[in-house]
Image (spheres, helix red, strand yellow):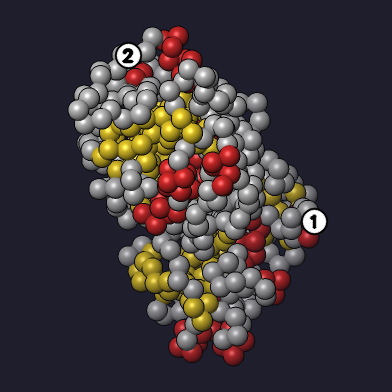
């Protein structure tokens, strides 16, 4: 991030029309706390419904009073505001610095948003960050966090500007260019209910200020709350300060095009209360301010000089895909997967599964597991734990007929923050195992994400992915990648029920090395994130049967 963002000498917007060249601008006065609160009252407040986008959630904004020097937008200004979202979209990636809250409780975020991909990558700091301190990646509807260890409070000083108390003396450092591989927690955005999450509401608005088409101008001119407020400087550029709706579009339209690896943002009418926008003459957005739910002020600055490429973490599907039909050579490679893997007997497996359990309405959980799959006996045996509940561990043994599970004391490595250890050998011989058929483990949405991955791993050693002639009809090449230093090709083979989905949109992906060995299964989960089952093919220990419960 450039240290020029936010500007050190930020000035308040003028309270009337810009002065003539012969009339120097008069210095503005610092607002008292009471006056500042009155000024904040004209801004919007996000209280977003989960999965519903921006919808009637901003604090209502009273139109300016008769003595307010602000004026209605001209046609040219309305055109510029209506084009703001498509201008942002075409800008691609921009640096972001945001401050949420008041001194002593503010949360500071710094990083980059890639509007065409619908992906943000930010560091989170500030005295109000609490358990959110660390790294964050987000797509519309989903937030991934990687918390830092507890740390002392950050700086609490203020700065100049329309919300002087918002800005800390220096922004937090941007996130590392290559995000860490593990430790990420996946959750749905929480922007609805009585206490919406401020960070999630900010992220929703951050994505909403970009779209792949302009917004209609007419409704902007008709809205009493759309106003020209004055002239200011932002990012070294002269800008107009405009008061407008949270999203200028007042009618629904198609969602912006997104990369196939991320869930599409919600569609439908996107309206709401007011936000202050700092727009230059070319329609570039340099800053916006609003009130989030709970009267939490937010100020967001953009830096177009900092435009690093973003790497999505594995739970968001990793690098972008470019789906195409697989070649004959590529389908022949996939057809060899069963024979190549079965010849080695089995594989050590590790899993990372952001999912919901047991039904979709419950919050996301982040499962980790390790163990083995034995293709000669069609058996998988693993230990499973939840990332944020290290004191609990479940053993799972699966075969063709179903699954047996039982709880056991946690592995010491898990309790101390280490990785998930393998399950004990031999398995416990008591009768505390619960046996269920695959069918009985399903719910209204079908098989759980964990079951889908384990079942697919078992099937690789029996049915494989099918003969080459059948694969040629459906398989898609997605991208070249690397896993543990080994080159792999990422394919997609849709299931029978997915015959109508577009390329790049099926749930299961297969990472295959040059010899035909399967190295990773990847599943698009119920949360919209991706789960991974990694395989290290080779001899495995004997995986004995367990007693019937």
Residue 157 at x, y percent in the picture: 30, 17
Name the disc covering residue 440, or none: 1
- Which badge, 1 or 2, is on the more N-terminal residue? 2
Question: Which of the pair 234/383 is nearer the observer?
Answer: 234
Question: Which of the pair 279/548 is nearer the observer?
Answer: 279
How far is mark 1 from mark 2, CA to CA? 67 Å
In the displayed structure image, the side of residue 504 where residue 329 appears, left or right: left
Q: In the image, what residue occupies the spot 75% across and 49% down?
A: 434
Question: Which of the pair 313/223 is nearer the observer?
Answer: 223
In the displayed structure image, the side of residue 496 where residue 295 appears, left or right: left
171 in relation to 541, above or below: above
450 in relation to 176, above or below: below
Q: In the image, what residue occupies the spot 47% across and 84% down?
A: 330
Name the disc covering residue 68, or none: none
In the displayed structure image, the side of residue 16 where residue 48 appears, left or right: right
Count of residue discs: 2
Q: Is residue 294 visible to the viewer in this orientation of the structure?
A: yes
Q: In the image, what residue occupies the spot 60% across and 68% down?
A: 506
In the displayed structure image, the side of residue 216 where residue 117 appears, left or right: left
Res 223 quadrant in image: top right
Residue 26 at x, y percent in the picture: 25, 19
Q: Is residue 518 visible to the viewer in this orientation of the structure?
A: no
Secondary structure category for the residue under label 1: helix
Residue 205 at x, y percent in the picture: 50, 40
The crowding category of the residue bearing disc 2, from other C-alpha atoms within 10 Å (few below 14, some 14 to 19, many at least 20), is few
Question: Which of the pair 205/505 is nearer the observer?
Answer: 205
525 in relation to 399, above or below: above
Secondary structure category for the residue under label 2: loop
Q: Nearer the viewer, mark 1 or mark 2?
A: 2
Read off the residue under disc 2. 30
Res 22 quadrant in image: top left
Residue 345 at x, y percent in the picture: 53, 73
């Amino acid at each position: 991030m450039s240290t020029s963002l936010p500007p050190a000498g930020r000035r308040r917007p003028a309270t009337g029309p810009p002065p003539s060249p012969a009339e120097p601008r008069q210095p503005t006065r610092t607002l008292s706390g009471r006056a500042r609160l009155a000024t904040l009252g004209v801004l919007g407040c996000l209280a977003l419904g989960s999965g519903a986008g921006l919808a009637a959630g901003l604090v209502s904004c009273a139109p300016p009073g008769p003595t307010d020097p602000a004026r209605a937008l001209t046609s040219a200004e309305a055109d510029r505001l209506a084009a703001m979202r498509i201008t942002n979209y075409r800008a691609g990636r921009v640096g972001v610095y945001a401050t949420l809250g008041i001194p002593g409780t503010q949360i500071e975020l710094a990083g980059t948003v890639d509007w065409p991909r619908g992906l943000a990558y930010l560091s989170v700091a500030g005295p109000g960050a609490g358990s959110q301190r660390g790294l964050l990646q987000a797509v519309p509807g989903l937030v991934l966090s990687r918390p830092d260890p507890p740390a002392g409070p950050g700086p609490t000083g203020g700065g100049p500007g329309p919300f002087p108390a918002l800005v800390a003396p220096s922004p937090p450092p941007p996130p590392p260019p290559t995000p860490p591989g593990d430790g990420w927690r996946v959750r749905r955005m929480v922007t609805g209910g009585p206490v919406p999450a401020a960070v999630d509401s900010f992220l929703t608005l951050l994505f909403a200020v970009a779209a792949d088409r302009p917004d209609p101008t007419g409704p902007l001119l008709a809205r009493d709350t759309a106003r020209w407020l004055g002239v200011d400087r932002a990012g070294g550029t002269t800008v107009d300060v405009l008061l407008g709706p949270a999203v200028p579009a007042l009618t629904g339209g198609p969602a912006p095009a997104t990369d196939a690896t991320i869930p599409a943002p919600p569609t439908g009418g996107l309206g709401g209360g007011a936000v202050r926008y700092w727009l230059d003459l070319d329609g570039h957005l340099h800053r916006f301010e609003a009130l989030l739910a709970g009267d939490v002020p937010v100020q967001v600055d953009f830096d177009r000089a900092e435009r690093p490429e973003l790497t999505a973490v594995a739970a968001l599907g990793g690098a972008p895909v470019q789906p195409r039909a697989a070649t004959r050579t590529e389908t022949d490679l996939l057809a060899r997967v069963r024979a190549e893997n079965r010849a080695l007997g089995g594989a050590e497996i590790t899993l990372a599964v952001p999912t919901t359990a047991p039904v979709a309405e419950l919050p996301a959980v982040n499962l980790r597991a390790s163990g083995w799959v034995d293709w000669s006996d069609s058996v998988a045996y693993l230990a499973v734990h939840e990332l944020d509940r290290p004191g609990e561990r479940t053993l799972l043994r699966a075969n063709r007929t179903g699954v047996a599970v039982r709880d056991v004391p946690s592995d010491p490595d898990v309790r101390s923050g280490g990785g998930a250890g393998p399950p004990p050998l031999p398995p416990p011989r008591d009768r505390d195992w619960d046996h269920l058929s695959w069918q009985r483990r399903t719910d209204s949405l079908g098989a759980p994400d964990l079951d889908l991955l384990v079942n697919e791993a078992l099937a690789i050693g029996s049915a494989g992915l099918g003969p080459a002639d059948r694969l040629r009809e459906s398989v898609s090449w997605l991208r070249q990648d690397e896993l543990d230093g080994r080159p792999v090709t990422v394919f997609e083979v849709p299931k029978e029920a997915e015959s109508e989905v577009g390329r790049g949109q099926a749930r299961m992906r297969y990472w295959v090395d040059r010899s035909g060995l399967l190295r990773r299964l990847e599943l698009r989960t119920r949360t919209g994130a991706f789960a991974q089952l990694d395989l290290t093919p080779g001899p495995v220990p004997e995986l004995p049967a367990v007693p019937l419960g």
